[in-house]
Image: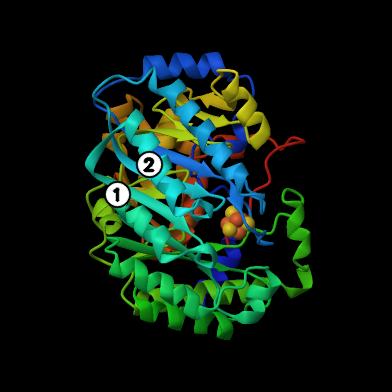
Amino acid sequence: MTALTSLLEKYSKPGPRYTSYPTAPYFHAGFNESHWLEELQGSQSLARDLSLYFHIPFCDTLCYYCGCNMVATGDYSKATHYLEYLDREMALVQGHVAPGRRVRQLHFGGGTPTYLKPQDIRRLMEMIRARFDLADDAEMGCEADPRELTREHLQALRESGFNRLSIGVQDLDDRVQKAVNRVQPEAMIRQVYDWARELGFQSINMDLIVGLPHQSVSSFSETLTRTLAWAPDRFAVFAYAHVPWMKKHQKLILEKDLPDFQARLDLQQLIHDRMGEAGYVNIGLDHFAKPDDEMVKAQCSKTLWRNFQGYTTHKDCDIYAFGASSISQTLDCYMQNEKNVKRYQELVASGHLPVERGLRLTRDDQIRRDAITKVMCDLELGMAVFGTEWDIDFQQYFADAITDLAPLAADGLVQLAGDRIQVTDLGRLFLRNIAMCFDHYLKQPAQAGQPRYSRTA
Ligand code: SF4
């Protein structure tokens, strides 16, 4: 066992990924439509730009590892119908948006956004532009599934203003692809990548997944060799979370086929080594980017942020999210839409904002979110400055966190030098563990019904 894999083993425990704090399991139904309406109306500062998210839940088939809110259907009319509701939902929100608020960022996620036919991609973007003021240089990204993609899809995205593409690759090995019901030959993915480059997408990300059935160090090494040779701008290498008690279809993946704990550790070591050798910067968690990428620049200039899509370069935006299950975010609140597509459509049809649950942050939540964000995005935190910003005595307020960080410091994951908490290069692989030291909710006594998180390694 290497020094790294023994640390990965030591720190492997269930923990959140902190795409929000408090994390989504703490959102509650007590936060309802009138609370969100009040928040929308009361948070219209022109100082904060907008980031829009659109959830397209439809997919042709089900990938067995899927953790998303999705609907597998061959009935395309469901998607055209759904766009009408997205437009109606936008109209409900638009009525409360102060004139002059600009959209700096826009993202299509899913599900499979490229399930939409090219003409419907254009139609949706026309609807959006009719309702919101998009900045000319807005960062516009879309998730793409190579299996359904034609050049016309990518052309529709480019002509609608999209400049970023995220391609779901996951693993190139045939046996792995068959075991997760997502068969996509390498030539097909390569074709999509070439089209995207040819059409001038500014940034191309590839999603890979580690921990899938039949994956081994040698098979995944081959996937890395082949995808690294294409030199995308970014990689997101997610660890598969096997949570069949939450996602019933994951029972279709046989546990005996999953890599064991040691193999998972070895795979993490492999990714760390190979990404580093290829010159990618480890942003944190599962994200790697070329040194000249916006994300690396944003990390250096401390403007990186985390939201429900992972890391983002747009820190001071409110997120308005549209579609079933999507999550909106302002400075003070999180709000999740109704997850069920039929109920979502019924609510919108009856003129309601389709709020399912949400949360208004307390002052303690705000302080802890800021600390967690600084650790996960800036990789450092100045205690005195932080204390002044929040009018607290940092040492006193976070006495428990400082105690919890001590063993991580002893293992070289953070440095507690003077007034600074500094994440080390090694610590970038343990950001969830470091952030967990600041999480008030994790420190509460365990109760029945408390969230169960995936493991950190
Ligand atoms: S394409 Fe994505 S959302 Fe659809 S089933 Fe596969 S993993 Fe899930």
Q: Quadrant of the C terminus?
A: bottom right
Figure check: 308 above or below 94: below
**Numbered mark located on residue 161 in the image:** 1
Figure quadrant of residue 152: bottom left
Q: Is residue 128 left or right of residue 220?
A: left
Q: Residues within 10 Å of mark 2 (few under 14, many from 20)?
A: some
The residue depicted at 42 percent of the width and 19 percent of the height is: 40
- What x and y, as percent, mark residue 202? 27, 60
Q: Is residue 95 above or below residue 203?
A: above
Residue 178 in view here? yes
Compared to residue 202, the image places residue 224 above or below, namely: below
Q: Does the residue tagged 1 have its C-beta within 8 Å of any atom of ligand 1?
A: no
Badge 1 marks a residue whose secondary structure is loop
Q: Is mark 2 within 8 Å of ligand 1?
A: no
Residue 23 shows up from this direction:
no
In the image, which disc is placed on residue 125? 2
Ligand 1 shows up in which quadrant of the image? Answer: bottom right
Give how far across and how far down residue 418 sits, in percent.
29, 47
Q: At label 2, which amino acid type do we have?
A: Met
Q: Position of residue 268 (x, y in %)?
A: 52, 71
Which amino acid lies under the numbered mark 1 shown in the image of this protein? Gly
Please give the name of the residue rendered at 47% of the width and 32% of the height, measured from the top-left corner.
328
Mark 1 surroundings: few (<14), some (14-19) or many (≥20) residues within 10 A = some
Label number found at residue 445 = none
Q: Earlier in the sequence, mark 2 or mark 1?
A: 2
Residue drawn at 62 percent across, 80 percent down: 174
Callout 2–callout 1 Cβ contact below 8 Å? yes
